[in-house]
Amino acid sequence: MANENPPSLGGEAEPNSWDFKRVDEEGPLPNPVGHTFPLLTHDLSGRWCLVGTGFYISSDGLFITARHVIRDVLRDGRQISPLVILHPRSNTGLFGPSEVLYRPITQCWLGERADVALGVAASATHTGTGEALQHWCWPLSWATPAVRARVATYAFPRHHLSDDGRVFHFHPELYPGMVQEVAEYRDKIMIPFPYLSVDCRIHGGASGGPIIVNGGNVVGINCTELARTADHPPGPAFGAQIRCLKDAYIDDAMLLGERIARRVAFDELTRSGCIRIEQYVARDHDEPLSGSLVRLDEVPTTAPHPEVVFTQYF
């Protein structure tokens, strides 16, 4: 049944065992609703599927996910399938049946070595007031977390999809753990970038989600979990450190006070206050930007939007 509660995947936190906070607000938040979201696509038959998780880092639509999530809809660097943010809106921290927005994505920077991506969600306005959509976002930390620091990831791998691929039932979960290892480099193929190893579970669909230290700052992006084998339990899991975004940029952007759209570097976004990062270290401006930019508004959705049911986290 499409409205069945999705089965547990393992490694979930006890309800209410972690306090999340909104930026610039005090007090715990029952869910990081509005911070974090599923990324969806559909095939030629109109069957929808979950490709990964993303999370906002600005109140107007800048977001982060994993590079391999975006590559799911690309071929030879060009978009071949639609990609949308399933934006769960809420003023209370609770999900509601009419509080879902299917938000297009305009562009995305893909890291050259690191499995990270910086995206731009399409502008959205309130149909009644005409006001631009504003939403909660995660504060980031540039600092390398300490080994054995308490961390968690919040994502949407626990879900059920109807047989026709048109009804989703999501049960977002928190997956807690500790940092096991941090380093600048692990290997040439799998993780050739600054990473952290955690013992959180990163199930399929959690890729691109935030790795959060207790207190609320995001220190990493979910990348992969080593598969279970006959003689080895699942894990460890690996994430890219936030500073892997140092070479990111977006096009057709204007900072406050500007009148001409241009390429804007991640460093500029941070120093202008668009993105909040603790312990930020500015990049060397003599170093060239790296990575690539892809358009994600070239293949629109053609299937009816799926019906969505959310189960409360707590």
Image (tube, grey):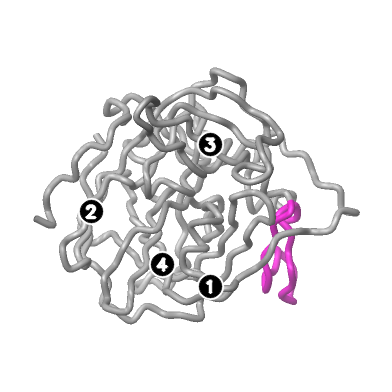
Q: Percent x, y for residue 290?
A: 75, 59
Is label 4 in contact with label 1 (beta carbons under 8 Å)? Answer: no
> Which residue position holds label 3?
238
Q: Residue 58: x and y, percent?
A: 56, 53
Picture quarter containing residue 264?
A: bottom right
Q: Secondary structure at mark 2?
A: loop
When the figure is inspected, residue 5 is found, relative to residue 306, above or below; the finding is: above
- The answer for how far apart the CA atoms under marks 3 and 4 are is 25 Å
Q: Marks 4 and 1, how far apart in space? A: 17 Å
- 122 w.r.t. 66: above or below: below
Residues drawn in magenta: 247-268
Provide residue 26's location: percent of width, then percent of height: 45, 33
Label 2 vs 3, first from the N-terminus:
2
Residue with the mark numbered 1: 75
Which residue is label 4 attached to? 84
**Quarter of the rendering occupied by the C terminus:** top left
Farthest residue, direction top: 148
Q: Earlier in the sequence, mark 3 or mark 4?
A: 4
Of helix, strand and loop, which one carries label 3?
strand
- Please give the name of the residue rendered at 67% of the width and 31% of the height, measured from the top-left corner: 143
| Disc on res. 96 | 2
* Mark in front: 3 vs 4: 3
Task: Answer with the quarter of the image where residue 292 lies.
Answer: bottom right
Tag 4: Cα neighbours inside 10 Å, few (<14), some, or many (≥20)?
many
In terms of image quadrants, where is residue 141?
A: top right
Check disc 2 and give the amino acid type. Gly
Disc with the residue nearer the chain's start (4 vs 2): 4
